[in-house]
Structure formats: C-alpha cells, structure tokens
Image (cartoon, rainbow, N blue to C red):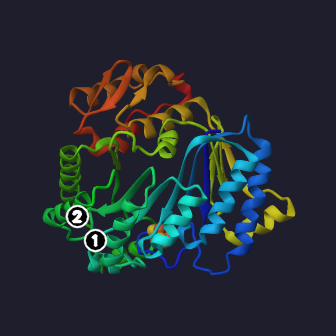
Amino acid sequence: MPGLYLHIPFCRQACTYCDFHFSTSKDRTVVLDTMELELIRRSKEVGDGRVSTIYFGGGTPSLLEPGRIAAFIQQAHDLFRVERDAEVTLEANPDDITAERLAAWKAGGITRISLGTQSFRDDRLKWMARAHDAQHALASIGLIAKAGFASWTIDLIYGLPEMTLAEWDEQLTIALDHGMPHLSAYCLTVEAKTALAHQVKKGSVHMPEDDAQSAQFDRLMERMDAAGLDHYEISNFGKTGHYSRHNTSYWEGVPYVGIGPSAHSFDGTTRRWNVANNAGYAKALQEGSTYWESETLSPAQRTNERLMTGLRTAKGVELARLEVDALRINSSAFQRHVSNGSMHVAEGRLVLSRAGRHFADRIASDLFVTDDDR
Ligand code: SF4
C-alpha cells in the first residue's frame, strides 16, 4: 500500500470548470474528525502498512490550519510504516500562501507543494472564479521557491476560450522565469454539471476548436523540452528528481488507500470509492455502516486501465504485464496506430510518439479488450 491519499473536501468558492467533490461550508470539524476515524479503520485493513507517498488533495487542503495537516501526518506515522524519505504533497491555492504557513507545513512534514496557479492573468482567473489574482499567483511562487521544500509544482490551464498561442507562450514564459522544477498543464475540458457546462450550453461561452488546443499542446511540449523538463506524463513535466512519485504510482497501477469523502482506493484488483457527500460520509462512518461502493476488476478491465493510464506516460505500457494480450487481440487497431506513427514498441513496452500524445485516450480505447478476448 505505498500511496495514501487524503481528500480535503472544502473550498473557499466554486471554480467555474470544477467537478471535484467539495463543499464551501466553514463547518469542517466533523468531517475532518471522521477522516481521522477512517484512517484508524483503514490502517487495520491494509497489508504491510508501508507508505511511501502521502498526498493531500481536494478540495483545498491549504484552507486547513497547518496544525491540522501536521496532525494527519503524525497520525499516518502512528498507524502506518511511513518511509523515512516519503514524498508528502500538499495541494495549495495561492491565496493561502504566506511565508509563515509554508514554514509550518514544512515543519509538519510536507515535502512538496502543488500550487493551483492556473493562470497569471487577472481576467482569466476572474473568469474561472478562482479565489486568487495574478499578484497572488506570482507572490506565492516566489515564496514557495525560497521555502526549501524538496520539490514543488504549479498547475496551469490552457485551451481556454479565445486563448491565442501568444497568450499561452506568455504564460509559459512567466512560469519558466520562476524556475519551477515541475509543471502540470491541463487542457480545459467541459465537465457535466459545472458552471462552465451551463455557460457553454446557453451559448455565453464558446469552447475553442481542437486545432487551437492542439497547437497549444505542441507549444507546451516544445517549451518544456527546451527548458529541460521531461514530458513524463501527458499533463506532467518535471526535472530529474522532481517527478510526482505519488501520481506515478497511480499511473503504474500500484495500490493506494484514499481517505475522505469521494476518495478512491485500489488494492490491485478492487476499486473502492467513498460516498461523495460530506454529511453522508460522516454519518455512515460514525454509525459503522458502509460508506463506499466497490468494484472488482476483471482481467480485461485491469488490462484496459493499464492501457489507459500507462499509455499516458513516457515509459508506456509493459506488454508482458498485461493480463490480456492487447497486441494479438487488437491487431488491426494496433497496426493502424503503429503504421500511422502514433505509437511503437520499444524493449517490450508500448509507447506513444509525440504525435500520438495528442490522442492518448482515444488510442488506448481503440486497444481495449474484453474478457472474451482471453
Ligand atoms: S479550488 Fe480546486 S477543488 Fe476547489 S473548486 Fe477550485 S478547482 Fe475545484
């Protein structure tokens, strides 16, 4: 069980595009206390209890007092065998960053900060309904860079309505000028039931053409390559030694335990997801009733998950580890994507080319297998 994920389901306000589970309630104590209870219960269920990464995601974990984060980390140490060099990441928003809080997080055991920057432009941040402005974004990066964490990363969003290549270039230049060792860059997508989905539906927002988003992705790859950041996953770029160990475990299909409302867990064969409702989660856990749903994956489902996540990584998918032979079964889709230059096999691994990275999810689903294929 190398990964431990804690979902902090609270945010200051709802961002336009977001479909994660969170509440804007300031009444947080009951849920946080219940998460401590869940940590105790889950520690008794898992195998050897070794933990090599801890990740505070959300929601907005940086909304919590640093002492509460430190208490969760201490509890993890008390209940699991947390490795001495464990990576401990905190997702933080720029409006929560001060030198004092950074020092407190570091003293409490955080080793890596993941900053939800998203943009360096006030008009874009306002449109996204983010709680911070461009000044916050820049100032917080300056403070994080000086705070002495083992690593840190920022998030940026591209593919915004009417975003030009020049605007995206400018965003990347600002980021690179601040010397970040890692970048997560996400193309804006319209998720169901978000404010953005409503705006698109009523016609007040028009999403850009695929060509514009694709050109921005190309520029992203060029700029990161020139700056010496490896493109190790479709949306992630890092200098050597700064790749996200926690997220890499997800992409490699390693088991993890998720704590908190909506958190997912995986033990190698079964996926489990907690109820995405703060009150329902707390009530069920305190009453000792079931607060999750689960699904045991068939060999074909496990193979398809490996294809979907592994193909997104620079290392690709190790074909010998697939439980269903994707190469043999889907020979026509396989051959098509090899012959058009989207992917190739190198040292037993199926790897996407730079061109193929534009269509990673589509290529993976073309290769999907069924249990009848075994
Ligand atoms: S801060 Fe993050 S989790 Fe919260 S609403 Fe915004 S994007 Fe979603």
**Residue 357 image position (x, y, % from top left):** 29, 41
Q: Earlier along the polypeptide chain: callout 2 or callout 1?
A: 1
Q: Quadrant of residue 349?
A: top left
At x 62% / y 80%, what residue is drawn? Answer: 25
**Residue 256 image position (x, y, % from top left):** 62, 43
Label 2 element class: helix
**Residue 173 image position (x, y, % from top left):** 19, 60
Relative to 367, is 287 on the left or the right? right
Q: Is residue 276 above or below residue 48?
A: below
- Please say if the residues under marks 2 and 1 sit with CB atoms less than 8 Å apart: yes
**Residue 133 visible in the snapshot:** yes
- Separation of marks 2 and 1 at Cα, in angstroms: 8 Å
Q: Is residue 26 above or below residue 339?
A: below
Nearer the viewer's eye, disc 2 or disc 1? Answer: 2
**Residue 20 visible in the snapshot:** no
Q: Which mark is residue 353?
A: none
At x 15% / y 62%, what residue is drawn? Answer: 165
Q: Quadrant of residue 350?
A: top left
At x 68% / y 80%, what residue is drawn? Answer: 27
Q: Is mark 2 within 8 Å of ligand 1?
A: no
Label 1 element class: loop
Q: Which residue is mark 1?
A: 120
Q: Quadrant of residue 339?
A: top left
User: In terms of depth relative to the viewer, which is nearer, 212 or 9?
Assistant: 9
Relative to 101, is 327 on the left or the right? left
Q: Is residue 157 above or below residue 268?
A: below
Q: Which residue is mark 2?
A: 174
For the N terminus, which image quadrant? top right
What kind of residue is marked 1? Phe
Relative to 57, is 267 on the left or the right? right
